[in-house]
Image (cartoon, grey):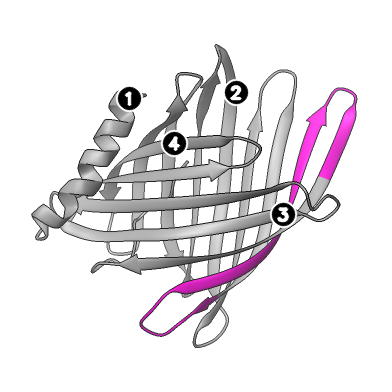
Amino acid sequence: MKILLSSAALILSAAPLYAQQFTGGELGFEYNQFVDDDSINGTNYHLGAEMAFNRSFSIAANVQNLDFEGDDTSATLHGIYHLNETSSLGVFVAGNGDEQTSFGFEGGTELWKGDIGGYIGQVDVDGETAVIFGLSSNTPIGANFSVFSDLDFVADDDVAVSTQELGVEYNITGGADIFAQVGQAEVFTDFGSDAETYVGIGARIQFGAARGTTFEAR
């Protein structure tokens, strides 16, 4: 994990030194709070940068800090192949310490003036293995507004956890994107399921020729 974080930091710090290869980056934060218990909340700060070798291949790094009933910093490294100007495939490896490491495949494409993406992979937590899966979409609904949705799912032999989010994003012309969302976290076991609803707000600034990174943190 130390190697992963060091590699991510190296990519992020090297971006200004190799401006001719730097394609895009992102800086943002997010705050979420459960509806039924306002004492449970969390913040997420994230930073990402992408550098291109040529028009087809690039690498990217994301670092995020999640403070939700405990502070957790994680890093994701991506190897990306751009099929064309609108579609990309990638592989990723991510970790937040000695306890958790994940890896898998990801992809995304523009569709109907918006974009869709997804990933599938495996996470190892304290020697236990689980499958991870996710889908996301973003669709413009006006000059500066868009609607986005996210689904994330993780499951092992005993338990499964899913989160679904739906939100609206507003782009300040020439500036940041701000958003509000509502989500649901649900846990499934052999004894039934339990769901909690949460709401959130956030903002991000995308920069560079590509306006951000191809893929996000995992």
Tell me what residue is drawn at x 53 percent, y 50 percent.
Answer: 44
Q: In the rendering, at what x and y percent does residue 16 appear?
A: 15, 56
Percent coordinates x, y for residue 126 in the rendering: 56, 14
Question: What amino acid type should be assigned to the residue bearing mark 4?
Answer: Ser
Identify the mark nearer the N-term, 1 or 4.
Answer: 1
Q: Quadrant of residue 147?
A: bottom right
Question: What residue span does the magenta drawing correspond to?
Answer: 170-195
Q: Amino acid at mark 3?
A: Gln
Q: Relative to 156, is 88 on the left or the right?
A: left
Label 3 element class: strand
Give the residue pinned by disc 1: 2
Task: State the residue at coordinates (18%, 53%).
Answer: 15
Q: Nearer the viewer, residue 75 or 118?
A: 75
Which of the two labelled residues, at mark 4 and mark 2, occupies the earlier sequence position? 4
The residue that mark 4 highlights is: 74
Residue appearing at x 39%, y 44% in the figure: 63
Of pointers 4 and 3, the one earlier in the residue sequence: 3
- Is any atom of residue 47 visible in this view? yes
Q: Residue at x 79, y 53 (%)?
A: 38
Cα distance in 3D space between marks 1 and 3? 31 Å
Q: Which residue is mark 2?
A: 130
Please tell me how crowded label 1 is: few (under 14), some (14-19), or many (20+) other residues with Cα within 10 Å: few
Q: Magenta stretch containing residue 176, yes or no?
A: yes
Disc 2 marks a residue whose amino acid type is: Ala
Q: Which mark is residue 33?
A: 3
